[in-house]
Amino acid sequence: MTDDVINKIDAQQNSRMAVLEQQLKDLKEDVDRVTQEENERLKGRIRHLEKWVAGAGAVIGVAVAGLGLVEVTDFGFAKTGTHVEQHRDYFKNILHPAMVRSNWLGPDYINLEGQSAPEWIKE
């Protein structure tokens, strides 16, 4: 091989290497750009979710505080709780004993037609 052929091959290889290096550099820039865009998009989604979670937490906090105020002020659930206690007392003192007794109206009430209820039931 002569020096001209060797120089020609070297020149071709140098130009191919330069082209490959430029392509590699372009690819790295593209990867960096796409990575940056993807990171920004994901950060935006995370910010959106953080705002949503904070809003939901605020709504839940207000709801819990409101229910607590309703309970404390005897307006609503506390009043309902009082009714439940009254109904529970009625059941325990009136209905349950009546269901347990064999003759729940008493010994004077064998035939119930036309009879009025005893006083302890009317309470």
Image (cartoon, grey):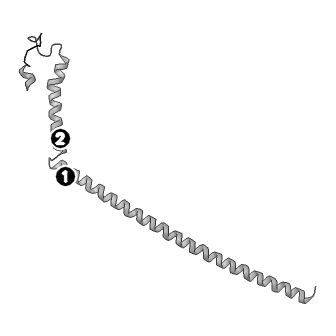
| Residue 50 in picture, x, y percent from top left | 39, 63
Residue 22 vs 56, above or below: the answer is below
* Labels 2 and 1: the sequence-earlier one: 1
Disc number for residue 69? 1
The picture quadrant where one finds residue 33 is bottom right
Badge number at residue 84: none
Mark 2 residue element: helix
Q: What residue type is labelled 2?
A: Thr
User: Looking at the rendering, which quadrant does residue 98 occupy?
Assistant: top left
Label 2 with label 1: CB-CB less than 8 Å: no
The quarter of the displayed image where residue 93 is located: top left
Q: In this view, does 77 lie above or below 15?
A: above
- Tag 1 secondary structure: helix
Instruction: State the quadrant of the N terminus.
Output: bottom right
For residue 35, side relative to residue 115 (left or right) = right
Residue at 60% over, 73% down: 31
Q: Distance between the residues labelled 2 and 1?
A: 15 Å
In percent of width and height, residue 103 lies at 15, 13
In the rendered image, the vertical position of residue 94 relative to residue 39, given as above or below: above
In the picture of the structure, the residue carrying the numbered disc 2 is 80
Q: Where is residue 9 in the image (x, y as percent from the top left)?
A: 85, 84
Q: Which of marks 2 and 1 is in front?
A: 2
Crowd tier of the residue under label 1, counting other residues whose Cα lies within 10 Å: few below 14, some 14–19, many 20 or above: few
Q: Residue furthest front?
A: 114
| Mark 2 surroundings within 10 Å by alpha-carbon count, few (fewer than 14), some (14 through 19), many (20 or more) | few
Q: Residue at horizontal 8%, vertical 22%?
A: 120
Residue drawn at the location 10% of the way across and 23% of the way down: 121
User: What residue is at 15 percent from the left and 30 percent from the top?
Assistant: 89
> Which quadrant: the C terminus?
top left
Tag 1: amino acid = Leu
